[in-house]
Each structure stands twice: as C-alpha cells, then as structure tokens.
Image (cartoon, rainbow, N blue to C red):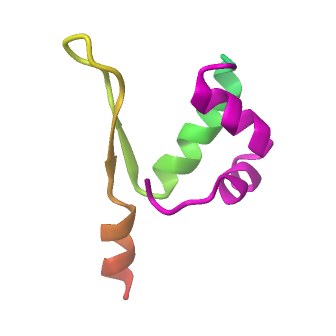
Amino acid sequence: MLGLKQVSAAEAAGISRRTIQRLESGELDRTHASILLQTYYENQGVVFVRPKDGQGWGLIDNSRASKAGQS
C-alpha cells in the first residue's frame, strides 16, 4: 500500500516502527498509537472504509492520484 515506508510513517506519526509492526500484526492494541497512524495515512490520501457484513476495514489509496495531480 502506498509505497510508504514504516520508518517514514513512524517518524511522521511520532511512534516507533516496532509499534507499527505490532499494530499491523494485531500483537498490540493501542488506541492512541492507532489514531496517530491513521491520521498520518489519511493526510497521505488514504481513506479508511468501515467494516461491513462481517468484513474487516478496507482502504482506498488516493495518495497516488493526489500526487499525480500535483505534477
């Protein structure tokens, strides 16, 4: 997704890369860290789609479209 690196996301969100890894694997449930990371991705153009019909969260990656429009 996005070609965004965990290191860049961690720095921008103010959390550690290990925290991101643990959030992504489901090993960690930290609401504050999750919100910081989600805010970072939303600022990059990602839209989070709420779960529906037993499905998990979805993502719409608008980051490439918004970058293409800037060129």
- Which residue is painted at 58% across and 32% down in the image? 24
Q: Is residue 46 rendered to the left or right of residue 40?
A: left
- Kindly identify the residue that appears in the image at 60 percent across and 27 percent down: 25
Q: Quadrant of the C terminus?
A: bottom left
Q: Which residues are magenta?
A: 1-27
Residue 15: in sight, yes or no?
A: no
**Magenta segment, principal secondary structure?**
helix
29 relative to 71 in the view: left or right: right
Relative height, residue 33 to residue 12 (above, below): above
> Does residue 54 sit above or below 6 in this rendering?
above
Q: Is residue 68 above or below residue 49?
A: below
Q: Is residue 64 visible?
A: yes
Residue 39 location, x and y as percent?
Answer: 55, 42
Question: Is residue 6 on the magenta stretch?
Answer: yes
The residue lying at 27 percent from left, 18 percent from top is 55
What percent of the width, then of the height, locates residue 28? Answer: 69, 19
Quadrant in which residue 36 is drawn? top right
The outermost residue toward the bottom is 71
Direction from residue 20 to residue 52 in the image, left or right: left
Q: How many marks?
A: 0
Above or below, 46 against 38 in this view is: below
Q: Is residue 51 magenta?
A: no
Q: Residue at x 75, y 34 (%)?
A: 19
**Residue reaching furthest left?**
53
Between 1 and 48, which is closer to the camera in this rendering?
A: 1
